Image (cartoon, grey):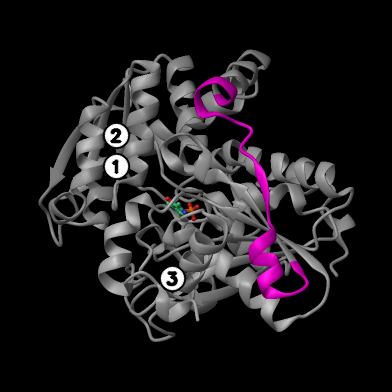
Amino acid sequence: MNKNRDFDNYLKEYPDENGYFGKYGGNYLDNPALVEAFKEFAEGYNTIAQSAQFIAELRRIRKEFQGRPTPLYHCQRLSNLLGRTQIYLKREDLNHTGAHKLNHCMGQGLLAKYMGKKKLIAETGAGQHGVALATAAAYFGLECDIYMGEVDIAKQAPNVTRMKLLGARVIPVTAGLKTLKEAVDAAFEAYSREYKDAIYCIGTAAGPHPFPLMVRDFQQIVGEEARSQFIEMTGHLPDKVVACVGGGSNSIGMFVPFLADPVDIYGVEPLGRGPKMGDNAASVTYGTEGVMHGFNSIMLADENGNPAPVYSNASGLDYPAVGPEHANLHDMGRINYVTVGDEEAVEALFMLSRYEGIIPAIESSHALAYAIREAREKNKPQSIVVNLSGRGDKDLDFVVENYGYGDKYLK
Ligand SMILES: *Cc1c(COP(=O)(O)O)cnc(C)c1O
């Protein structure tokens, strides 16, 4: 067990005023307009978002619009099936729009309103971030420009429809491979032109300072609720806390409130088809230190330092880097980073569906799969809280087409 008294002052020490978590983080943008824009944004965040009025308004929105607190749920049938481990789920799938992403999008939307901005700008890959942000824009009466590669637009038709229904403009990006990387460049470009009237909203706890800090702060509600709900339910702390790691937002929000506790923490990265470069997106497990998208962290890069191709059957997890705070907590030895592949994740999806009546997102299924593996390997009484980051509706067609109804996994 870690000596977690070392983490009593963690939040005061990390990040420093330049946005560094140890050696990771910072702001490595070289476009002067963007440097200016991010400075203004960081100042806005540091003053406005800490005010009592902002905090009270966000709290009200979370309760009345998002449906928070989300429940903590004890999986009794699944736990009984597996043995002596008790598995609990933090139900972020029941957050409005069906995933944790709205937690930081509503925070960013409220900040835009307080800063007097008229528009939210972002890129999206699979479209989940775009839908959450378009939802926030509709709620706050802001314009919303979502940059999306043409290839992704064709692949993600339901999410494109949702964004348009919510009033967002979906702007096709036709450069290069026409996917997420080009969309990121286009969104940054638009922000550098429009930052007087707009804010850029990132989809995870990564990017240049202050995004990793801001997204962590807005996501922390997940771990705070889970921690007090678990104590209320059982009278003690859980033994283990688990979440999946793409860029790292649902996991950092879940983990930070447990850092100073004697609790083992596991970040689950997607192993995809296997350990070979290009077959997974396990950035912490297989990556190296480098700078990408304006921040320093651990990442999967090619020999020129450019983002390497990555793969996972969970489109929300196939990001070639990880937020800088994860890189630092990895180096500090506080969080264990482990991997789960495509098949093991899908087995967990089928098990939760059949045994508990909950169809999880494939992303979240990676976290659940690790808890199931722990339960099978260690036949001792222990409790594990899994962050169920989202619901599986978006994955149904893909799962059934590729894996059927799971009979092979449910022997
Ligand atoms: C986007 C997404 C993730 C991965 O993003 P993080 O920033 O790592 O949390 C995980 N689960 C779901 C359901 C998502 O939509």
Q: Secondary structure at mark 2?
A: helix
Distance from Cα at disc 3 to Cα at disc 1: 35 Å
Sequence-wise, which precedes: disc 3 or disc 2? 2
Residue 269 part of the magenta-drawn span? no
Q: Which residue is mark 2?
A: 191
Is residue 297 visible to us here? no
Vertical comparison of 220 with 177: above or below:
above
Q: Which residue is mark 3?
A: 346
Q: Is residue 367 left or right of residue 232?
A: left
Instruction: Determine if residue 139 is in view.
Output: yes
Report the amino acid beneath label 2: Tyr
Q: Residue furthest left?
A: 174
Q: Residue at x 39, y 86 (%)?
A: 276
Crowding around mark 3 (Cα neighbors within 10 Å: few <14, some 14 to 19, many 20+) is many
Determine whether the residue tagged by mark 3 lies in a helix, strand or loop: helix
Picture quarter with the N terminus? bottom right
Query: For the residues carrying marks 3 and 1, which lies nearer the camera in this image?
Result: 3
Residue with the mark numbered 1: 188
Amino acid bearing label 3: Val
Q: In screen coordinates, is 218 left or right of 392?
A: right
- Mark 2 touches mark 1? (CB < 8 Å): yes
Residue 125, position as x, y percentages in the image: 28, 52
Category of crowding for the residue at label 2, using alpha-carbon neighbours closer than 10 angstroms: few (below 14), some (14–19), many (at least 20): many
| 57 or 199: nearer the viewer | 57
- Bounds of the magenta segment: 62-85
- Give the Cα distance between marks 2 and 1: 5 Å
* x, y percent for residue 386: 64, 58
Q: Which mark is residue 400?
A: none
Residue 381 horizontal/vertical position (percent): 83, 71
